[in-house]
Image: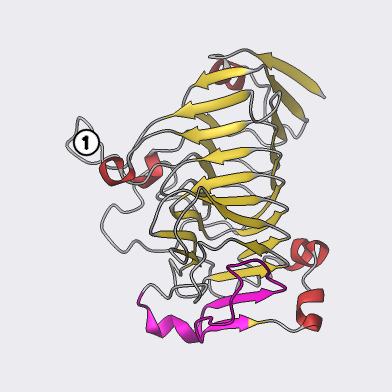
Amino acid sequence: MKIISAAPGQLAQAIASLPPDDGTPVTIRLAAGEYREKCTLSRSHTTLVGEGAQHTRLVWGDGAYTLLPDGMKRGTFRTATLLVDAPHVTLQSLTVENDAAPREKVGQALALYVDGDDFTCEDCRLIGHQDTLFTAPLPPKEIEPNGFIGPKQFAPRIPQRHTYRRCLIEGNVDFIFGGAAAWFEQCEIRSVEEPGYVTAASTPEGQPYGYVFHRCRFTSNGLPQGCTYLGRPWRNYAKTILLHCELGSHIHPNGFHDWDKTAAHTTLFFAEYGSFGPGAGTDRAPYVRQLTQEQAAAITYEHFWQNALG
């Protein structure tokens, strides 16, 4: 395994120095400090390791509403602080943040954009406001012209699996969104403003899994009771499952929102088992399923990984 070291301000330089993408594992070790850089990692079998999420921070501040020289707005998918555009990539012990604010003025502002199968994120912080984490692929079609403008606008929509372990993911509106099959294990999902929506899955039709949150904590920074939904369907086949999760009082009694898409009631899959805490009420929306013990027990990480993509 090849190891490359980088100091603050040198991540883009370290990425540019990576050897050819021949399947050989490479690790970039990031020293403590703030890396105010906007970077793209497009080499597979590459790991970025920091010295702890509180100490190694990759930060940028692009927002979707910014007008570019050609007169167009930047748009959501050109805002990412870090774009991972390769399979078999791992992030460990660092923060990826988009500090563009306030949301009402800057719009969507991605911290991390991941487009690659077998992505792993461990002991990291993903910090932003609206659209903090995008888990590709994009949906097949835009709703608005140029809605997907950005680096992967015309790329193939490749099914993929992501794993997030012991991470803090922070935001307010749709701050975990996209079409990947993604497993979140023992993560803290922190809402920071109201009104809020945690997830906006766009699970492709026929894909067995969308988002699975296992033993996660849904917290807030002191938000009012019932002001945040666990998710809403960006596309009609959205899938989001919570297993044994702790829900703060900021979670709305209905649990999920349908985004006024009544046609999606029969196609989406929003489900829970073993939720607890003040946000784990019994007044869920009628399209939210309560899994049986047998159904929940069948949803293991091993089954997810082997069957997530069908």
User: Could you tell me which residue is drawn at 61 percent across and 82 percent down?
Assistant: 289
Report the predominant secondary structure element of the magenta stretch. loop
For the image shown, how many numbered marks are present on the structure?
1
| Quadrant housing residue 99 | top left
Above or below for 82 versus 268: above
Left or right relative to 3: residue 182 = left
Q: Choose top left, top right, bottom left or bottom right for residue 304.
A: bottom right
The image shows residue 132 at horizontal and vertical percentages of 48, 46
Quadrant holding the C terminus: bottom right
Amino acid at circle 1? Leu
Q: Residues within 10 Å of mark 1 (few under 14, many from 20)?
A: few
The spot of residue 274 in percent (x, y) is 72, 73
Q: Residue at x 73, y 53 (%)?
A: 186
Asked if the magenta segment contains residue 282, the reply would be: yes
Q: Position of residue 18 (x, y in %)?
A: 65, 21
- The residue most toward the left is 71
Q: Is label 1 in a helix, a strand or a loop?
A: loop
Using the image, determine if residue 129 lies above or below residue 210.
Answer: above
Q: Is residue 39 magenta?
A: no
Residue matched to label 1 = 67
Compared to 209, does 221 lie above or below? above
Closest to the observer: 309 or 242?
Answer: 242
Left or right, 121 with reference to 75: right
Pick the quarter of the image with the N terminus: top right
Spot occupied by residue 213 in the image (x, y as percentages of width and height): 67, 61
Please give the range of residues in magenta.
Answer: 260-289
